[in-house]
Image (spheres, grey):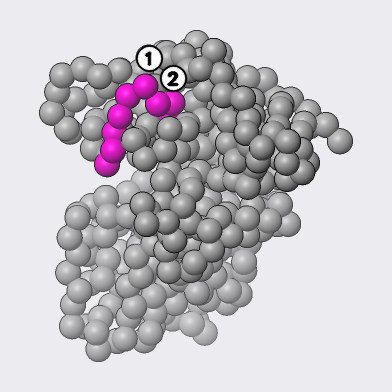
Amino acid sequence: MVKAVSIRKIDGKPGQVYYPLEHITLPDAPPQANEVVVEITAAALNHRDLFLRQHLYPGTTFGVPLLADGTGVVTSTGSSPEAKKWLGKRVILNPGNGWKDDPEGPESPKGYAILGGTKMNPLGTLGETVTIDAGELEDAPAHLSSIEAAALPLTGLTAWRATMVKSGNAKPGRNILITGIGGGVAIMALCFAVAAGANVFVSSGSQEKIDRAKSMGAKGGVNYKEKGWEKALLELLPKERKQLDAIIDGAGGDVVEKGAKLLRPGGVISIYGMTTSPTMPFLMSAVLKNIEVRGTTMGSRKEFADMVKFVQDNGVKPVVSRSVSGGLDNLEGIDSLFEDMKAGKQFGKLVIEVAKDREAKL
C-alpha cells in the first residue's frame, strides 16, 4: 500500500468550508509497459491546493493525493525501452496531461488535467510514490536540490508560457512589468525574463518584496498601493525606451486601464490569473493603442520540456519561501504551509520534503 495525503470531507459551503488534511492509503500500482514508479522526495504547494481545501476549485474530490508539483527518483519501470531508460534517474513530473504541443491549447477533448486533488486526474505528488507515464518526465536540473526542483513544475510552466511564449517580449532591451511579485508564478517570470536579458520591473504592496525582487535582478519596483504608481514606474524606465513592452499579470482588475498608460503601441498584457477581480474592462484607450490582452494558463508538454531545458542551461533557481521536513507524517507542518499561503506571507514556493534526497544512478 502507498501512503499519501488528501483532504477529508466535512460539511460546509464552497468558500466557507476548509477541508482538513488526512492520510490515505492507495493500492500499489505496478507500472504498465510505458509507465514508471517515482519515489517522491519533495512536493510543493500551489494556490489551487488552497482553493481545493476551500472547495473553490473545479472537480474538488476526496481520496486523491494532493499537489501537482513533485520530484523524485524512478525506482521501477515497465517493459518499454522508453520507460527503462529512466530507472534510477532523478526526475521532475509534468504537472498535468492532455496537452502535447499545440500552441493554442490542449488537444484533449477533456481539456488539461492537472495532478492533485480533483476528479480529472487520479494522481498527485503528496504521496510516497506515483506511477506515471514515462513521457511525462524530465531530468531534474542537476544544479537544483530536490526541494528546489519540486518548486519548479507548475509555476515554472505557467510563467514560461506567460512570459516567454505569450508576451513575446522576453528579449534583451525590452521593458517588462511583472505585477504582484512574491507569488510563485511572478517570481519565476522574473527569473526567466532576467535570464533572457529583459529590463524587468515589478509591483507589489510590500517594499520588502520589491527589494527582494531587485536583489534577483529586477531593475526597479513600485508599490501599487501608492497613488500614481504608474507615473513613478515610467520614471524608472531607461531613457532610450520610456514605455513598457509587456505586462505579465496575475491580478486582472484595472490592468488594462493602467497598461494603456504604460505600454507602447502594440504592447502586450499577458494574464495568467485574475485574483483581484473576475471581470476586467477593456477600454477604448487600449483599442486606440493596439494593445493586446492575451490569456494564458499552464502550458503544453513541449513548453514544459523547453522550460526545464532553459532552467538547466541558464542555472535558474526557483525561490523557496519555506520548506518543512518530517515527511508525510508531519501533517501539522504541511498545514502550516497552507497557513502561510492563506496569509500571503510567502515570497516564493512552499515545499514539503517527503523523503531525503537520493542520488540518481549514473
219 up-or-down from 206: above or below? below
**Main secondary structure of the magenta stretch:** loop
Q: Which residue is mark 1?
A: 22
Which element is circle 2 on?
strand
**Residue 132 or residue 70, whichever sits in front:** 132
Residue 94 lies in the magenta stretch: no
Q: Residue at x 42, y 72 (%)?
A: 246
Q: Which residue is mark 2?
A: 5
The magenta span reads 58-67
Picture quadrant of residue 293: bottom left
Residue kind at label 2, given as amino acid type: Val
Circles 2 and 1, Cβ within 8 Å, touching? The answer is yes
229 up-or-down from 348: above or below? below
**Residue 288 or residue 67, whichever sits in front:** 67
Q: Residue at x 28, y 77 (%)?
A: 260
Badge 2 crowding class, 10 Å Cα cut-off, few under 14, some 14 to 19, many 20 or more, is many
258 up-or-down from 9: above or below? below
Quadrant the C terminus occupies: top right
**Residue 107 or residue 259, whichever sits in front:** 107
Residue kind at label 1, given as amino acid type: Glu
Q: Residue at x 50, y 74 (%)?
A: 168
